[in-house]
Amino acid sequence: MKESDVTINYHFLFQAFPDPVIVIDKTGKIIDLNIAAKDTFAEIVIGEKLENIFSDKRKIRESLIELFQYHKVIIDKAILKSKFDELVTYEFKATILSEVKDQFILCFNNLTTKNDILKLEIAHAFSVEMNALRPYLNKAGKELVEKKHDKNKLISLFESQHQTIEPYSLINEDVVAKISSYFPDFNKNELTISFYISIGASVNQIALITGKSANTIRVMIHRMITKVNMESSSKFSKILKEITE
């Protein structure tokens, strides 16, 4: 195969790859990106610093330093702004593309915070529904439910997803810092709740994530609103979204 054919095939695969892919040089500047990256992220300019497209710039700088120094595979999570001006959580894998040209490639997998919250809700709902059946079953029925529960691949899938999600790891420290600068009197729990409100999480979702009851979350939000002299929860939510945009 001719070298030109190899280049054409590489370019086709690069552009056809379904996940967003970005190529950078050893200074961290973007030198290429595929169609999926253009369609997924906010406008990216060739030649700009990669860190500029991340919400948490400090985190990506640390990952890139390790990548440039040791040429090892880096797997991490970060938040980027989507084409629709939303903050989206991605897992990215970065590695060296060419020892000669010092080019590095980053592949992104969508791990949106809202999707992770939804996984938690689904796993919780399955558990609640299965437990709700037990009081109405005889011994044989309960044994059958237990057996089906253990062998049900769908339930096992959600349970494994539930176990791998660390709710507090979903929080974006840069976003929390913005909220803290605007509401300096908020404690850690209040900042956590504020973050989830800013991304549109419901009271029930926040309760599930934090392990508190929905009533407790409502009381905490009411106290927060009172603390900052807000007129309503809707106004508080609107301000949080404006702060974190």
Image (cartoon, grey):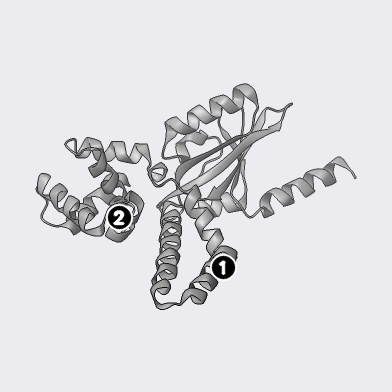
Q: Amino acid at mark 2?
A: Ala
At label 1, counting other C-alpha atoms closer than 10 Å, the crowd grade (few under 14, some 14-19, many 20 or more) is: few
Secondary structure of the residue carrying tag 1 is helix
Q: Amino acid at mark 1?
A: Lys
Residue sitting farthest toward the right: 1
Q: Quadrant of residue 66?
A: top right
Residue 21: x %, y % from top left = 61, 45
- Label 2 vs 1, first from the N-terminus: 1
Q: Is residue 13 visible?
A: yes
Residue 8: x %, y % from top left = 78, 48
Residue 82: x %, y % from top left = 45, 51
Q: Label 2 to label 1, Cα distance in Å? A: 30 Å
Dot label at residue 45: none
Q: Is residue 23 above or below residue 159?
A: above
Secondary structure of the residue carrying tag 2 is helix
Q: Are marks 2 and 1 in contact (CB under 8 Å)?
A: no
State left or right for residue 23 relative to residue 115: right
Image quadrant in which the N terminus is located: top right
Residue sitting farthest toward the front: 139
State left or right for residue 122 relative to residue 99: left
At label 2, counting other C-alpha atoms closer than 10 Å, the crowd grade (few under 14, some 14-19, many 20 or more) is: some
- Name the residue that disc number 2 marks: 207
- Name the residue that disc number 1 marks: 147
Residue 158: x %, y % from top left = 51, 59
Q: Nearer the viewer, residue 132 or 186?
A: 132
Q: Is residue 128 above or below residue 178?
A: below
Q: Is residue 173 above or below residue 146?
A: above
Residue sitting farthest toward the top: 69
Mark 2 or mark 1, which is nearer to you? 1
